[in-house]
Image (cartoon, rainbow, N blue to C red):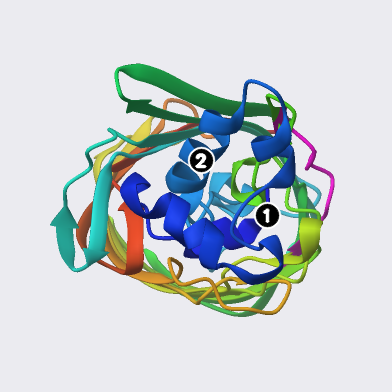
Amino acid sequence: MNERLSSVYHDPMNARSNQSSCPHGRGRSPSASTRPGHRGLGRVTIALLATLAAAGPLSAQEGGLGIFTGETIFQYGTRVSISHLRESRTKLFRGDDRVANPMNQRLVEHRAILGLSHGVRNDFSVSALIPFVEKSFDSRVAGRKLRMDSFGLGDVAVLAKYRLMKQTWPRGAFTVAVIGGAELPTGRTDFRENGTRLPTSLQPGSGSVNPFASLAATYEEDLWRFDAQLFGKWNTRGARNFDDSDVYSAEIAAAYRFVHEPYPGPSHNFRLGLSYRQYTRARDDGPVLVNSGRSEWILRPALTMHPRPNIDIVIAADVPLHQHLRGTQLGLETRTFVAFGIRF
């Protein structure tokens, strides 16, 4: 399915007129409209996928455990982690305002991520994040339920982390680190529904190499910890010449250890973060997609538990405080994160 379908207004009553007015067949998929028995589905698909191309899929690096902080893993230490991310988008927005969703469109993404981190030196570590992705889109049109989904290996992220500085004092420390890496085009990009290829936003992979970089700082004092992070990801042209949105974010967070027993006793903390994200407009083989680009303010409460010094358990959620979507798109409803890690 051509990614330019996302520039068609989502109203199915306008789908036919928008198709006929698009030059060179840009507004419709020949495979969907000419396949016997699928002409109606092709028209509906055009209307439904209008809100999907810019949905801002999750990324592998979002499943990292303890990576985007100022600290580095201890020298020659290794962490293996398993995490699960779930994101749902069920509400339709135009700009700052929620609008009617007459077709009950719903987009849900699950990611199970295997994380591997190794401390090469006490100030340098390398990591790989291997995601397994499931995406599903549901809608109901004229009493008929329509479902499109895909699953499989996603784009693997590889990265390195270097600690620029570390200052310590009794019961406290301040560290700064730089992180850099890239998502590799390891995920599948050819899932089809009734013979029609799903848009790249619904594929497990992107088909592109997407570099990213981050600057992170951590300040610790007694039972308190404060983190700050700047992050950027630049998506290159991928499958079907689709350029997804670049991502820029800033985050600050504070954590308090409400349980802290002498070593090797347990240690638990509650963390509260505030994050701002900016997604640029996406492009399909050159033209900008109308229904793409957004900004978000996210509140991030999290509970981190260390029943033993080498075990990490994290439960977190993203709560949207405000989101501004350009054009008409499905906005974020919930994002949850659960992770288990062990260091040895």
Q: Position of residue 208 (x, y in %)?
A: 80, 61
Q: Are the residues tagged 2 and 1 within 8 Å (C-beta)?
A: no
The percent coordinates of residue 123 (x first, y second) are 72, 68
Instruction: Determine the main secondary structure of the stretch shown in magenta.
Output: loop
Residue stretch rendered in magenta on the structure: 181-192
The dot on residue 286 is: none
Q: Is 182 within the magenta?
A: yes
Q: Would residue 186 be counted in the magenta stretch?
A: yes
Amino acid on which the number 2 mark rests in the picture? Arg
Report crowding for label 2: few under 14, some 14 to 19, many 20 or more residues within 10 A (C-alpha): some
Q: In this view, does 251 lie above or below 57?
A: below
Q: Nearer the viewer, residue 81 or 124?
A: 81
The type of residue carrying mark 1 is Asn
x then y, percent, for residue 255: 28, 55
Mark 2 → mark 1, Cα distance in angstroms: 13 Å
Q: Mark 2 — residue? A: 43
Locate residue 267: give its quadrant: top left
Residue 51 on image: x %, y %: 42, 52
Above or below residue 215? Residue 65 is: above
Q: Which residue is drawn at 59% across and 59% down?
A: 27
Identify residue for label 1.
2
Single out the mark in the foreground, 2 or 1.
2
* Left or right of residue 260, residue 45 in this image: right
Considering depth in this image, is 86 or 281 the residue closer to the camera? Answer: 281
The C terminus, quarter of image = top right
The image quarter containing residue 159 is bottom right
Name which quarter of the figure residue 232 lies in.
Answer: bottom right
Would you place residue 215 above or below residue 331 in this image? Answer: below
